[in-house]
Image (cartoon, helix red, strand yellow):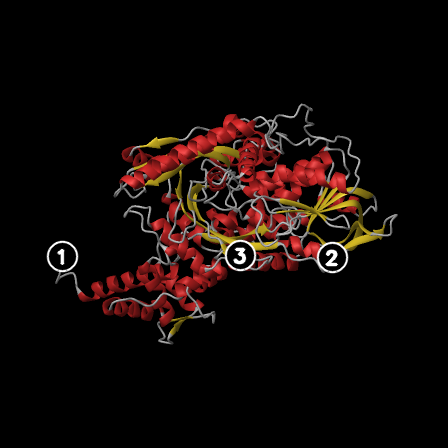
Amino acid sequence: MASRLRRLGISTFGACAGATIAAWALNANNNYTVETASIAKPRVKRQLPPRSEQIQVLQSGEEYDVLVIGGGATGAGCALDAITRGLKTALVEADDFASGTSSRSTKLIHGGVRYLQTAILRADIEQYRMVKEALAERASMLHSAPHLTHPLPIMLPVYTWWQLPYYWVGIKCYDLVAGDRNVKSSYVLSKSNALELFPMLKGDKLCGAIVYYDGNFRFMPRFQHVLNASFLPVSGQQNDARMNLAIALTAARQGATICNHVEVLELLKKKDENGADKLCGAKVKDTITGKTWEVKAKCVINATGPFTDHIRKMDDPTVKTICCPSSGVHIVLPGYYSPQQMGLLDPSTSDGRVIFFLPWLNQTIAGTTDLPCDVTHNPKPTEDEIQFILTEIKNYLNSDVEVRRGDVLSAWSGIRPLVSDPNKEDTQSLARNHIVHVSPSGLVTIAGGKWTTYRAMAEHTLDAAIKACNLKPEKEECQTRDMKLEGSHGWTPTMYIRLVQDFGLDCEVARHLAESYGDRAFPVAKMASLTGKRWPIIGRKIHPEFPYIDAEVRYGVREYAMTAIDMIARRLRLAFLNVQAAQEALPAIVDIMAEELKWSKDEKERQIKMATEFLATEMGQIVNRASRDKIPINLSKEEIALYIKRFALIDKESKGYVSINDIRRGLKDIGVSLSGLDMHDILNELDLTYNGRLELSDYLQSFGEMDVSGEELHEILREIDTNMNGQVELDEYLQMMSAIKSGHVAYSRFARMAELEDEKHEAEKLKKKITVDRSGGGL
């Protein structure tokens, strides 16, 4: 024990001394420190042009200085950097802005403490500079988008006394390296204070906790955060898709031509004066209309994340693959799993990974995993990864919180594009930082890195592009340091009050609009429909559980949303928050988009089909259902007998299965009168109609007064019909009840209907069995 304490003391002293010396030696000559640029930043140069106009400009045949391929965070950052230097810039994205990794991240703005540990213990100057750069960029993001970003406290619970000083030293070293760009100072909590701030935490053997801060993207009154490993990595939270879009829209307002759903089919080349092949543009295709054309450009930048090698092989089919993709899965749980303004970090899971557990948009997000995977446009979460996350978070929550598989509201997978550096002879080892590579034909590739450093990555890329392609920018230096992004210029923390008072918006909706759109919330509010109520006056919600309103769908089209998936996944984030709620809101969303985009009936049906497939495969709907179906039937004999009886009450004709007509008859037989709250609860669960026009006020006053719609009946049937044959067999019903008992399913309308049918049947039997005179009543 004494030798362990001596080693711990030496390590602690060495870490502090190393961090102090490194900071003193390198801080004065650090190329990565972000300083406020002396050049005045332009606010807004033009109105946001519609996508049709952007496409027309891209088809005009004019030559661009820079053509960026990829509309993720890095690609959008490159477009913004290029246009603000005075270069004629275009950006094309095969899908939607942030449709790939940039919308499936851990929602954080972090520095990477595990790299700081390596830098100190191994005297690795490169890793120290990488952490220093990330911390500076974290501060820059907090400044450039204050409506989207905010500090978030993250708690690290400590259950072994000697770990308190160890982790405390690690976090203080991190604070020290951040210097004057630090968000807030970390601090230590006693056991009682830790449990007061995070009451869901397991208190047994808890010694205390350490709380640290990092930048996080603001999105509603809840925040999230993450860490990495070992030395306690520190991170921040974000609405990644909204931030990505803000960068792209800022570039568009500055004059860049940005087009989503435009795919690169081929890279174009021509001979230079020395007879060598040089890139001169790309052949592209508008996937919405199917039209193809060529775009001329002096420089082509490859910022396609996991698809880096796909574009590189377009340039040279013989190049070696440099991308090593890794899958990270996250899950969303109900909000009661975490307090509203405190995150949690597990720095050492059973297999050495890191799990974060954070409040996000009134829900709780947990993750992530890290497994090798194939590059795909449609990454899917797996049941094994979901179970791993659930198992790990169980270790930190008290017995009052039962971690149930059925509480998983959504799950998604993102692909992290780790890369080997083609600039080095040893291409086998993965680069910890980003790499910029210029091919012999002039293709500039930016790969690797992290969300937090997108701006610095773009700066380094444009510096290399200007040199490699002999570009002539109006301004040599980068103009994006601390530049305000879309929506941030007129935003204040209390701006939402003006939205409430000026427009008559619900307070929750007003906060959401202010913290999602910044000063652009006012044009959004002007599009809102009247509610027909005394309060709120405007802002019809597209789903009663969430603050999203109809105006956001209309405004989302003006922000280049072209498909229903664009809307539910990246403009509204419903798909990421609650896959079932997204399915329920889908018809209403498609109706509004159809009005804006002039969709036909066939197109509306196609959009609903594609979005439903997206929710099923990429947002965890199928894997949620499959997990339930794998649960063994662990019911007692008494329970099985009870459920068989209930099943038989619905299957009155003894067919052996329950059909739609049986469900319709069962609901009518119940004849329960519904209160307003009851109607809200049912409305939240049912997929009403595929046109989204059924209003709550028109809903059933009682199930016995009118027929339930066909879509509602089919939805009830689908939740239990595992073999998809349009009917419910007895074994499927028993499987559902077993899943409810084990916690894999939280609720079933079919099961509730069967229960009410049983209660009604027992009440009728009682009436027949006991007459008035035998019961003692009468004269």
Distance in Å between CA atoms under marks 2 and 3: 32 Å
Estimate the spatial distance between the alpha carbons at disc 3 and disc 1, rounded to whole Å. 65 Å
Is residue 291 in view from this perspective?
yes
Relative placement, left or right, of 27 versus 385 is right
Closer to the camera in the image, 170 or 607: 170
Residues under numbered marks 3 and 1 in contact, where contact means CB atoms less than 8 Å apart: no
* Residue to which mark 3 is pinned: 618
Q: Is residue 476 above or below residue 281?
A: above
The answer to whether residue 178 is visible is no
> Percent x, y for residue 346?
39, 45
Residue 726 image position (x, y, % from top left): 47, 70
**Quadrant for the N terminus in the image:** top left
Q: Position of residue 648 (x, y in %)?
A: 32, 71
| Quadrant the C terminus occupies | bottom left
Which residue is the site of mark 1?
778
Residue 2: image quadrant is top left
Question: What is the residue that sits farthest to the right in this orientation?
Answer: 273
| Amino acid type, residue under disc 1 in the picture | Gly
Q: Which picture quadrant has residue 90?
A: top right
Residue 96, given in percent of the width and then of the height, sits at 64, 49
Three-letter amino acid code at the position of disc 2? Asp
Q: Nearer the viewer, mark 2 or mark 1?
A: 2
**Which is more foreground, mark 2 or mark 3?**
2
Label 2 to label 1: alpha-carbon separation:
97 Å
Q: Earlier in the sequence, mark 2 or mark 1?
A: 2
Q: Farthest residue toward the bottom?
A: 655
Residue positioned 35% across, 76% down in the render:
654
Instruction: Say which amino acid is labelled 3.
Output: Glu
Dot 3 surroundings within 10 Å: few (below 14), some, or many (20 or more)?
Answer: many
Which numbered disc covers residue 316? Answer: 2
Q: Earlier in the sequence, mark 2 or mark 3?
A: 2
The one nearer the camera, 32 or 346, is: 32
